[in-house]
Image: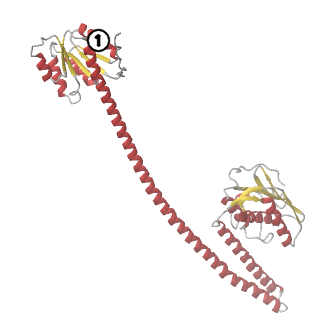
Amino acid sequence: MGVREEVPEPIDVRTANVLLVDDRPENLLALDAVLQSLGTNLVHASSGREALRALLRDDFAVILMDAQMPDMDGFETAELIRQRERTRHVPIIFITAHDKESSAQFRAYEAGAVDFIQKPFVAEILRSKVRVFVDLFLKSEQIQRQAELIHQQEQRRLAEDLEREHMRQLNEELEERVLERTQELVRANEDMEAFCYSVSHDLRAPLRAIMSTAMILLEEMGEELDEEHKDQLFRQSAAAKRLGVLIDDLLQLSRLGRKTMARQEVDLSEIAHEVGQSIVSHRSGPSIEFEIEPGMETSADVGLARILLENLMENAVKYSPDGGIVKVGSKDGVFYVGDNGIGFDMKYAHKLFLPFERLVTDREYPGTGIGLAIVHRIVKRHNGHIWAESKPGKGSTFYFSLDPLHGAPPRLEMI
């Protein structure tokens, strides 16, 4: 039995070009027949000049060239190939019918050839030699591609490192700026708190003096004063009292923007009942009835939610008639406080939540015009929405949400 020859795994040479240079078409066809099993891209050139043009277009793994060609022989062509930087390292195999002892072989190697094969040649030997150069070419291409890939990866890694370092520096600068800004805000809040305390403390003393002086004069000299002077003293006392309330409201409004919020699940129904009881216990005027929907819950700051309901419910009570009804309820995630009081013209609705803007006279309905501004600020602190619907003589309803997902005003019937 003969020894089975191990067949080497085929080399992937699909991208390798082999240049065949010969002025005789039959010789080119013969080379095609020998090399086509390699699977390379065989490019024909019938002259030295045509070979040079092909080398300008493509890269080649190896060149098989006839030494004897008219006009420009293979030796001249090889010398020109070696003079170009791009092609000087392309292997050249001469295939010629020159006598073995002639000087042609010397000229071939002097021109830069790597091999010199005389005709007739052995097909298997020529194919093996071409395969070696094609294999070397492909491995060289692979190494070059890997080197380029490594270079690209290194460049990308370097760019990423630079970007990370840049981002780190930016984050450090941002953190420093945030820290500085936070410290500035803390100092500003402390200064504002000190100022507000000073204003409150410094104004309350003279206001109490004005009120007490007016009351003392009324008590001690009431019999000697005529009605006009008594009325002026009463007005002076009432104005001082109203100014004190206004100071309290303004301080509360200014503190809302600085108060730290702590959201949690809040039972608005329970808070509304407590607020309603407090209003009734401190109210000496006409009777009022509260209808409060049970089970109203939301996420909010408890303290701010109480202030919100206090202002809305007190506002509703203020403008309700004797025996009036104030309703606190919800629909589709939106809460409302409504009354059947005097109402207002909706063309003035844009003024409702502005400080000191009032749609009624102070003589009819005393107030500072700060309550709804406080309500508006609390709702905005919760990223919510607030709006109102009303008709003169038909009551008013204030809607609010403490959740930005419930921001579209629903069409609810007037109470």
Instruction: Name the quarter where the N terminus is drawn.
Output: top left
Query: Which residue is at 36% across, 39% downward?
Result: 150
Q: Position of residue 132 (x, y in %)?
A: 28, 22
Establish if 393 lies above or below 21.
below
Residue under label 1, please give it.
Answer: 34
Residue 87 appears in which quarter of the rendering?
top left
Residue 47 position, x and y percent, is 20, 15
Q: Which three-letter amino acid code belongs to the residue tagged 1?
A: Val
Quarter of the rendering containing residue 40: top left
Report the side of 92 relative to 308 (left or right): left
Is 292 placed above or below 248 here? above
Q: Is residue 215 above or below residue 188?
A: below
Up/down of 160 relative to 311, above or below: above
Residue 343 at x, y percent in the picture: 81, 59
Which of the two residues, 110 or 79, is positioned nearer the viewer here? 110
**Residue 38 screen position, x and y as percent:** 33, 17
**Is 11 in front, or is 349?**
11
The one of 58 and 206 positioned closer to us in this rendering: 58
Q: Residue at x 85, y 91 (%)?
A: 223
- Secondary structure at badge 1 equals helix
Query: How dense is the environment of label 1, judged by Cα within 10 Å: few (below 14), some, or many (20 and up)?
Result: some
